[in-house]
Amino acid sequence: MNLTESLLHALVDHGARQIFGIPGDFALPYFRIIEQTGILPLHTLSHEPGVGFAADAAARVQGGIGVAAVTYGAGALNMVNAVAAAYAEKSPLVVISGGPGLGESQSGLLLHHQAKTLDSQLRIFQEITCDQVRLDDAARAPADIARVLGNCVRNSLPVYIEIPRDMVARPCAPVVREAPRAVDADALAACVDEILARLRAARAPVLMAGVEVRRFGLEDKVAELSRRLGIPVVTSFMGRGLLADQDAPLMGTYMGLAGLPEVSALVEDSDGLFLVGVIISDTNFAVSGKHIDLRHTIQALEARVTMGYHTYADIPLDALIDGLLARVPHADAHFTVDRPAFPHGLQADEATIAPADIACAVNDLMAAHGKLPIASDMGDCLFTAMDIEHTALVAPGYYATMGFGVPAGLGVQAATGQRPLILVGDGAFQMTGWELGNCRRYGWDPIVLLFNNASWEMLRTFQPESGFNDLDDWGFAQMAAGLGGDGVRVHTRAQLKAALDKAIATRGRFQLIEVMIPRGVLSESLSRFVNAVKRLNAAKAA
Ligand SMILES: Cc1ncc(Cc2csc(CCOP(=O)(O)OP(=O)(O)O)c2C)c(N)n1
Ligand SMILES: [Mg+2]
């Protein structure tokens, strides 16, 4: 076995199911081995940001790790933003980069694709990954790979692996996966007892599910725990889409002043808020109507449990949930909640289209044809998703980068085989929407709802006086055929419904529905979010 094969088998062993990538001369040798061995399927895309977003989304939906394979310098550094997004949102993404061989590194020449020094790339990735290795020693490689991939899975964070191009075919032993780390049973029991005591003493306990629940594959168990405890569940903004397919007492998504009042009141009035895998970020908590004193909550995140001004260390979330389930008997009665209703029954008439109509049309579509997993970009399309029935959702809800939506949708279909619905604004589509041109090669056929307001509308809501938020009308629908798909531009609600009916009935080609939305027409969630931010900022300034 050679070093690349050893790495590929280790990737499979740690939960990788495919590789997304773009080669270069520093990467051609290891790409050849990927292609020749077929240990993992390789999907090449067109631009490295898309490679990173697709691999990140694949990791999020399949519960394993994502793999982004690139060349040195121009390739890897082109993907920094996507890896930073994965780091911020705790996605287990493995970055593999080809690199200069030992001989050329010592040639005394500056090498092409080199930035500052030959170590610059590794140093840049140290800031956005939890572990790194350059595989320049075949004897040490199996242990290095086991350590790095073990950290990727254990922390649910990106890692960086550089393969010098003169090392790819060196004989190498197989990688032996690290043994799971032991959890202190006494500390776990004490932590479980204290959490249960606090929840039982609370008048109005609530469980908020965050992204770590998905990252560690705990949705079924968390749903079961909430039923047994008899407490309602909400998701964080980032956690939207969690528990969509579980029988959970799910009330909705917490968005503070931007969200549904009944959901916000449930969270903000709770005296027993149990934050399970929730990232304490501004997008999750900054627009709270009533200040949530996080010091009075129970926070389980990054293998630590904090409550009552003290922290239990080294309590992995899976061990904690198992410990709680072991101590909470099956509930006698089936605990349910009255979930707020989502909009249905689109008026298919000649009226222009608002984001609320898109949510309504999608809810009607899923009611008639079954749920679709959703990949959403940043922009009002993501806020519109809050009015769509709960379904699997991948979106940059915290890091908030544009460009995620289309590549992420391709990653979802590559990973699951399920046809995704992609929500993307015109500004974000200008960045990475062209990855749709790769669908035909792989048989992917997403349905793309392109919110075209010819504007960076989210920015305009915060700074309406700036003319630079105006975008031109690019005519995206007309470009679909050249990319291998079908495109249609719709102006009215009747045209939107007809386009969705045609799209869902057409398989084998991506379906691009360019929805023309008048500037200034926002989703209700975004309107509430912007008004909340302005009110809170005004209050701070006062
Ligand atoms: C990679 C990156 N560069 C800039 C920005 C900053 C930004 C946040 S929202 C936004 C406008 C989005 O326009 P779009 O048409 O896609 O959607 P909509 O607002 O609904 O009209 C920008 C430029 C971000 N978040 N990421
Ligand atoms: Mg726009």
Image: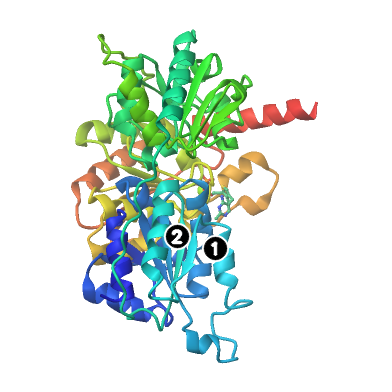
Q: Secondary structure at mark 2?
A: helix
Where does residue 534 sit, x and y in percent of width and height? Answer: 68, 31
Q: Which residue is mark 1?
A: 125
> Can residue 473 be seen from the camera position used here?
no
Q: Secondary structure at mark 1?
A: helix
Where does residue 216 sit, x and y in percent of width and height? Answer: 37, 41
Identify the residue shown where x is 46% and y is 51%: 157
> Can residue 313 be seen from the camera position used here?
yes
Where does residue 89 sit, x and y in percent of width and height? Answer: 49, 46
- Which quadrant of the view contains residue 357? top left
Residue 337 left/right relative to 464: left
Q: Nearer the viewer, residue 164 or 286?
A: 164
What number is the disc on residue 432? Answer: 2
Residue 499 left/right relative to 154: left
Residue 153 left/right relative to 399: left
Looking at numbered disc 2 in the image, what kind of residue is underneath it? Thr
User: Crowding near pointer 1: few (<14 within 10 Å), some, many (20+)?
Assistant: many
The span from disc 1 to disc 2 (Cα, nearest Å) is 22 Å
Q: Is residue 404 above or below residue 531?
A: below
Q: Nearer the viewer, residue 349 or 122?
A: 122
